Image (spheres, rainbow, N blue to C red):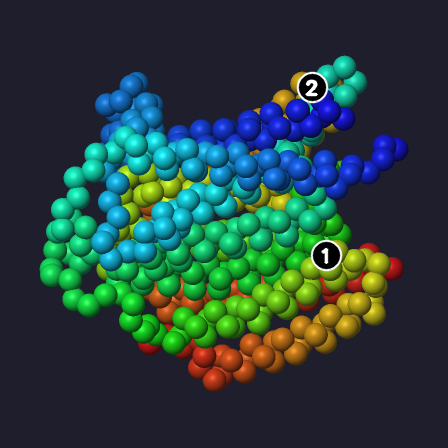
Amino acid sequence: METAPSLFSLYFPIVLMAVVAIGFVVTTMALTHAFGPKRPTKVKDDTFECGIEVKGNARSPFSVKYFLVAILFVLFDVEVIFMYPWAVNFRELGLFGLIEMFSFMGLMIVGLIYIIRRGALKWD
Amino acid sequence: MDSMLIYKALLTVGVFAVSLGIAAYLTWGERKLAAILQDRVGPDRAGPFGLLQPLADGVKMLMKEEMIPSKANKWLFIFGPSFFMLTACMTGAVIPWGSGITVDGVVYPLQVTDINIGLLYLLGVVSIGVYGIMIGGWSSNNKYSLLGALRASSQMISYEVAMGMALIALTMITGTLSLGEISRQQDAGLANVVYQPLGFLIFIICAFAETNRAPFDLPESESELVGGYHTEYSSMKLGFFLFAEYINMFISSAVMATLYFGGYNFPFQHELGLEGNTLAILQTAALFIKIAIFIFVFMWVRWTLPRFRYDQLMNLGWKVLLPLSIANIFITGIVMWALGKLN
């Protein structure tokens, strides 16, 4: 049996991938900046609103529903992340782990039912 | 060890180049397939069958005038598409493209790196991709872009929860997050889709939503939002947004093939009497055939199904897919317990 690969050899390729990708992105951006013509006019640089004169700007309040979805996402995603270590060790933890996680998920379902009943996910 | 590092470096560049090349030809493939489905000819001017079209498009994107709206946040405006492209390129690193080529007794794996948190890495990189869209759409300072970006991010994060849950049920069976290990397990046993049909269904729907593909292409629904989050973009910055979508499509097809359809393994591969490198090359070919089938499904669906309405999209994500994926975990757990797979 060979020895387990070192952390360096495992994660170095990921760093490498990032370097290659950053290199590609930066080069391409620089190239398109260098090659493209530059003939800016005031009208051209205006915000596009289907040819109608621009009214105000986009830095205005928007529906609070999006914030709600974001907060719910954080709640549920943390729970999902919490479940990964359990899922990996599922077989070793046995019936005890199963029951523990089912009770945890039961609470989560109660939460989900609560937010649905409160109309947090109602879009109209 | 040093030769291994050099090999890994070459493989990294190779995987990067292949995913870029495939994504480029997917744009051609998509247009051809759309043409066939709609009884048209499709691109046929640049080269035979329009095969040089991706090249022409690339050059055109590169040479176009770069416009940055006067009201936009300049650096964020550039950063958005760059970041989106960057995250799209990073995901290919953990996918096993084949079992490995043996040269002089040394096995050269066809996977850039087999980290034991492969699945988490994948989820993590995919989910930070949403920043690219959000930053790009917000910094444009355009109402359409802002709405598109908001839709994109709330859609992507909503479906990510169900996606994570579907993968948990898969992890319960595999007991590992390493994609290489998951592939090897499917060599010994059956493809995971046999054990996780519901999980796969949830995963593929979420993959459509995560890649912003039809029928979940609300972020760029042209009939209401002009171009959605990339309304204000031009030149290669627009190209990055469009191109990254194809890379994402390619990578998610590869992920689906790896996680649920046996990865590079194909049926009866050990009964053919093939060994070593011949088998390894055939396996890689098998993986790419599976990927091609998934990509075809992606395109087929796009040109067949109409777009969802926003409330339908959110209801599907939170009230159908999420409870279904929770139920899937329950079912998986109980069945595994009943079959005595637990300690």
Question: Residue B100, how many percent across, how many down?
Answer: 69, 27
Q: Earlier in the sequence, mark 2 or mark 1?
A: 1
Residue A91: mark in rendering: none
Q: Residue furthest bottom?
A: A118
Q: Seen in the image, is B85 located left or right of residue B5?
A: left
- Residue drawn 67% across and 76% down? A106
Question: Residue B312, how many percent across, how many down?
Answer: 38, 67
Question: Residue B305, how many percent across, how many down?
Answer: 35, 52
Residue type at mark 1 is Met
Residue B277: mark in rendering: 2
Identify the residue under disc 1: B172
Residue type at mark 2 is Asn
Which chain does the numbered disc 1 sit on?
B
**SS under mark 2:** helix
Count every numbered label the image shows and give the total. Answer: 2
Which picture quadrant has residue B149?
bottom left
**SS under mark 1:** helix
Which picture quadrant has residue B303?
top left
Question: Residue A74, how many percent across, how many down?
Answer: 55, 69
Q: Seen in the image, is A105 located left or right of residue B299?
A: right
